[in-house]
Amino acid sequence: MSGCAPPSNASPVPNSPRAFRPPAREGISPRKVVLRDRVPLEGEYWAARAGDSPFPEGTLLPAGASLPRPIPAWYHPFVPPEDPIPFGYTVVHADDDIIVADKPHFLPTTTNGRLQRETLQTRLRVDFGEDDIVPLHRLDRLTAGLVICSRNPATRAAYQRIFLEGRAVKRYRGIVKQPLFCDEEIRLPMHKPRGSRQVLVADNGTPTSTYVRAAGREVTVWPRTGHTHQLRVLLNHLGRPLIGDDTYPTPRPLSLYDFSRPLSLLHETISFIDPLSHSERQFFSSRGLGTTIR
C-alpha cells in the first residue's frame, strides 16, 4: 500500500489528556521509533503524537505504507525467553497509588539491557495485571530490599518528588569484609566513566552524602543522595568492601545466573511523608542479608 494518508478504516484513539501509548505486552513496555520511507512489513506500529504527522495519534499504521516524512511510532520489540531468576518478591503494602515490594537479591528492578522479562517491574505488571506500575527509585540487581512503585499515573508525580527532592529516609544494612568503626556523615564526589562497571571517587564527580554507623563488620548506612553504587563505592573507598561485591574492589566476570555469592546489602527500611495524606509512612523489609559473619 502506498500513500501518506491513513486508511479509511483506521481507528485513532479518542482525545485524551494522556498521549497515546500501546499497552504493555507480558509486562514489557512498547518502544518508540522514528520510521522513515516505509512502515516495516513485520510487526505492528502505531502513530505516536506528532504535530506534522498525517496519521492521527494511535492509528495502526498499514504495513508497507510509504511515508512522506519521518513518522514517530510505537512498536513492541521482540523479547526472547529468559531463564528464570529463582527468587521471588513479596508485597509489603499495596493501595490505590503505590505498591511496596520486597525485592530479592539478583532480580533487577527494571530492565538492564540483558534482562527484560526477569525484572521486578515486569513481574509486578504481570502479577497485578497493570501496565502502569513504575518503580520510583533505583535498587541494584544485587541489592535486596524495599522498592516503592507507583501504580497510578494521576498521583505518580507527587510520589516521584519525594525521591527527586531527597525527602525519603532510607536505611540500609550490610556486612563488610573487615571491621569498621565509624559514626559520621561522609561526603564523596563520584563519577561513572562511560562504558565502565565501576564508579570512581573523583574530584570532578557528583557530590554524594551518606551517614555511616558501624562498630565491627555489620554496618548501617543512610544515603542522603542517590548515586549509582553509592554505598558500595563508599565502603570500598574506606577499605571495607561488602561481602559478595562482584565489582569492588576488583570486578569479577559478570554472570547473571551465578547465585552463589549474594551481595551483603539490604534496603531494610524507608520512611516519608505521604504527599496525599500528609501522614508519615514507614515500611520494613523482612529479608535477611544472605550471608553470615564469619
Image (cartoon, rainbow, N blue to C red):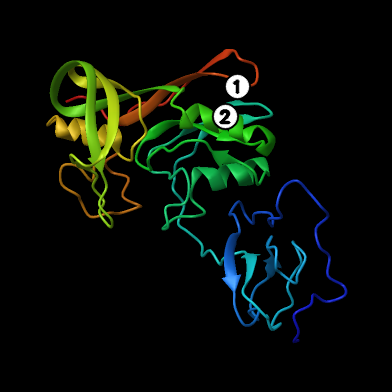
Mark 1 secondary-structure assignment: loop
Q: Please rate how many residues cluster around mark 1, counting C-alpha atoms within 10 Å: few if below 14, some from 14 to 19, many from 20.
A: some
Residue 244 visible somewhere in the drawing? no
Q: What residue lies at 35% left-to-right and 25% top-to-bottom? A: 224
Percent position of residue 162, x then y: 51, 27
Tag shown at residue 275: 1
Residue type marked 2: Tyr
Asked whether the residues under the numbered discs 2 and 1 touch, taking CB atoms below 8 Å apart as contact, a structural biologist would say: yes
Quadrant in the picture for the C terminus: top left
Q: Is residue 262 left or right of residue 118?
A: left
Above or below, 239 against 269 in this view is below
- Pick the residue in front: 158 or 118: 158
Q: What residue lies at 29% left-to-right and 26% top-to-bottom? A: 209
Residue 287 visible somewhere in the drawing? yes
**Mark 2 = which residue?**
159
Dividing the picture into quadrants, the one containing residue 144 is: top left
Residue type marked 1: Pro
